[in-house]
Image (cartoon, grey):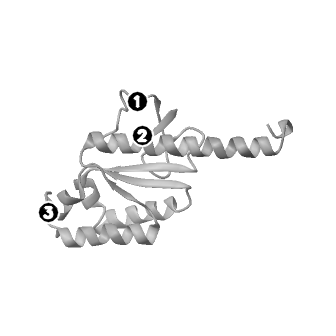
Amino acid sequence: MKIIRDTREQAPFTFAGYDCEVVAGTLTTGDYSLAGLLDRCAVERKSLDDLLGCLTGEGRERFERELARARGLDAFAVVVEVSFQDMAEGRYRSKMKPHAALQSVLAFQVRYRVPFLWCGTRAGAEYAAYHFLRHYLREASTRYKSILEAHGPQAA
């Protein structure tokens, strides 16, 4: 599996110990995708402070544009490096109230049909990102193989 990591990613996952190759590239949506499937699947990584920055002002407008673009993908998820409880209890530096932050995230999930995976730790978020991409690749491979088989050798 070849994972494409966006060149602008501020704190990139290394995916050390995972069965994959990581290559830097420019993504229009998300921080991680799959070679050959950039227009189909992506994962956005967020630390808690980064996520909070995406819930106010210019950061919110930019993030909502990204979520709107992600609606055109087959699969997209936001992996958050902390737990839902961390946000709910206000374990961050922002002055944004936890209730307001959570309401924004819940509204985004409904409005843009995107899951936010609260992973508890950075390692948990890396695990979730890797396996989200791996599962998408497996499903896509099965789908494309079925299409090629249905059309015979001339389709390949």
Mark 2 Cα within 10 Å, few/some/many (few <14, many 20+)?
Answer: many
Q: Secondary structure at mark 1?
A: loop
Can see residue 26?
no
Vertical relation: 55 (above or below) 151 = below
Q: CA distance from mark 3 to mark 2?
A: 28 Å
Residue 144 image point, x, y percent: 68, 44
Q: Residue at x 26, y 60 (%)?
A: 53
* Amino acid on which disc 2 is placed: Tyr
Mark 1 Cα within 10 Å, few/some/many (few <14, many 20+)?
Answer: few
Rendered image: mark on residue 130? 2
The residue pinned by badge 1 equals 18
| Res 6 quadrant in image | top left
The residue pinned by badge 3 equals 89
Rendered image: mark on residue 33? none
Foreground pick, 47 / 63: 47
Foreground pick, 113 / 96: 113
Q: CA distance from mark 1 to mark 2?
A: 8 Å
Residue 119 image point, x, y percent: 29, 49
Q: CA distance from mark 1 to mark 3?
A: 33 Å
* Amino acid on which disc 1 is placed: Tyr
Choose the circle earlier in sequence order: 1 or 2: 1
Q: Secondary structure at mark 3?
A: loop
Residue 35 image point, x, y percent: 56, 38
Please indicate whether residue 68 sits to the left or right of residue 120 in the image. Answer: right
| Residues tagged 3 and 2 counted as in contact (Cβ below 8 A) | no
Q: Residue furthest right?
A: 154
Vertical relation: 47 (above or below) 2 = below
Mark 3 Cα within 10 Å, few/some/many (few <14, many 20+)?
Answer: few
| Res 126 quadrant in image | top left
| Residues tagged 1 and 2 counted as in contact (Cβ below 8 A) | yes
Q: Secondary structure at mark 2?
A: helix
Vertical relation: 80 (above or below) 110 = above
